[in-house]
Image (tube, rainbow, N blue to C red):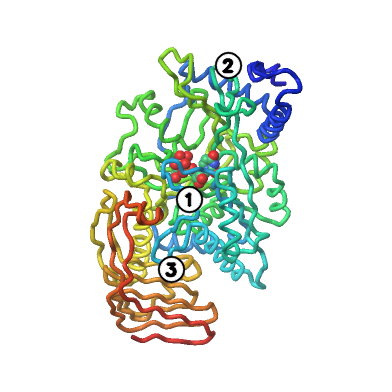
Amino acid sequence: MLLNEGQMHLFEHWPEPGVDDDKKKSFFDQVRRLNSSYPGGLVSYIQNARKLLADSKAGKNPYDGFTPSVPSGEVLTFGDDNFVSLEAAGVKEARNAAFVLVAGGLGERLGYKGIKVALPRETTTGKCFLQHYIESILSLQEASCKMVDDGCHTKIPFVIMTSDDTNALTIQLLESNSYFGMEPSQVKILKQEKVACLADNDARLALDPNDKYRIQTKPHGHGDVHSLLYSSGLLEQWKSEGRKWVLFFQDTNGLLFNAIPSALGVSAIKGYNVNSLAVPRKAKEAIGGITKLTHVDGRTMVINVEYNQLDPLLRATGHPDGDANCETGYSPYPGNINQLILELGPYIEELKKTHGGISEFVNPKYTDSTKMTFKSSTRLECMMQDYPKTLPPSAKVGFTVMDTWLAYAPVKNNPEDAAKVPKGNPYHSATSGEMAIYRANSLILRKAGAQIADPVVDTFNGQEVEVWPRITWSPRWGLIFRNVKEKLRGDSSISQRSALAINGRNIFLEGLSLDGTLIVNSVDEAEVKITGHVQNKGWTIQHVDYKDTSEKEEIRIRGFKFEKVEQLEVNYTEPGKHSLSA
Ligand SMILES: O=c1ccn([C@@H]2O[C@H](COP(=O)(O)OP(=O)(O)O[C@H]3O[C@H](CO)[C@H](O)[C@H](O)[C@H]3O)[C@@H](O)[C@H]2O)c(=O)[nH]1
């Protein structure tokens, strides 16, 4: 098969039989793996590569014949009646959902040595992203089941896609933390394989520079999630259990679950087969733009145009300024945050046709303008948000736009690169990711009627950010806005230098005035009333330089740490009514 596909160079250096036989066998083991993990096998991979490499060499525009325009979708306003009723609809649907986290990426831009889901989402509680995601899913599960008259016992499935770069550490994180309270059988790990590297325009496979009996491999991208789900058999299983929705999300967005309930509500009410979550996008921000593409033959689709392709597409279609902000100060194209909600039934039907194969692209770096040779080997890649590209025109493809402060604060950039982000564009760093959580929680409490002090502006690792009171809560306290409103009774106020960590379901703030640090933990069966004036020296914020190797990497990359001078910490471990009146 390899010889038929022009791959004889792979064997040219092979010595006579009897020499290096073990290595030769392991070469074929690898070939077998590469063959079975790609839809259509290696022959398809090589043929697809040849075609895409020829298109790339010819400078063919993948959007040839398409004209972009601004699509219309659902635009939600946090906290209004529509938002609140969509959240309720979403919680109701959640028991019919399955969640899929794509976490196979190495996070090269961040440069963190561990896996990204193990990073603290914020350092007030120190809970990592994965713990927050699991607790959010469990809270949704519980809240959703409560909405059924006779209760339900469904367990929302949670799939994590890993890769060789993240698999062992992800399993270790789950196992050493008892799956953060989830039943281990609820969690399924699907590991994506890498794909073969390509050495030249003829799609000759590249050998590993350090091992001539190994084909060099690189990641194929998050689009692999569709073929892995298809071949795992999970989709059919979910369908037979009566599930309706599959929600995909990425590794480090600490705000995401603020947006899930209402977006799922939109999917249910609008009957969307595909619903992408979006936020207003700053021109040139490294998130794709959701775009309506109209072909000369009349076809249209609403699809993510990746951030590196939007500018050339716009310039080629009569927009000389390319990817630019309009009078609103934002790009007219909503920014895709890669949170997709797919309706399970139509999703399975589509995958039966495609087997999960997703439209691919290739991005070779040529040595010169003749485009004859590559600087280094390349490979085919695919993205999960390209799933709608193969859908028929009858498919209901929509999107839901929410405020960035509420829904999107990823951790992708290292401090050095973040500090170079043009002013006004988001940093997408560990610093901004954590500060965004405090801002969102402060704004949500404000909207619910609490008096939250204004932020101060400070600079960490060269990034100017707003520092709001460090307010955090566990998902079972404030899953949706209605829950937050129910738990705020009477006038409460929180000063700027304060930190508040609420960890427990039934904790009610009834006229709390906080100036310092307060940590409240309670078991679910306890009902805790917090009133009065809590004042202490609190936790101060210390600056940390990202180059200061005496600090842990998790701290260095955010540029600050808390000095825990004084706090009030209360723990309610017994059921029943309790009150703290300071
Ligand atoms: O082979 C891979 C590559 C990535 N990932 C995972 O895919 C997610 C996204 O990866 P990146 O954060 O590197 O993605 P980008 O920033 O390049 O871009 C993606 O996320 C952006 C929003 O965060 C935009 O939505 C953009 O359109 C979309 O392609 C991460 O959870 C990552 O772990 C994999 O699982 N396997």
The vertical placement of 228 against 516, above or below, is above
Amino acid type, mark 1: Lys
Q: Nearer the viewer, mark 3 or mark 1?
A: 1
Density class for disc 3 (Cα within 10 Å; few <14, some 14-19, many ≥20) is some
The answer to whether mark 2 is within 8 Å of ligand 1 is: no
User: Mark on residue 116?
Assistant: 1
> Which residue is label 3 attached to?
473
Density class for disc 1 (Cα within 10 Å; few <14, some 14-19, many ≥20) is many
Q: Is residue 326 left or right of residue 389?
A: left
Q: Residue at x 63, y 16 (%)?
A: 9
Q: Which quadrant of the rendered structure holds the C terminus?
A: bottom left
Amino acid type, mark 2: Asp
Q: Is residue 458 left or right of residue 358?
A: left
- Counting from the top left corner in percent of width and height, residue 392 is at 60, 35
Q: Is residue 503 left or right of residue 236?
A: left
User: Mark on residue 202?
Assistant: 2
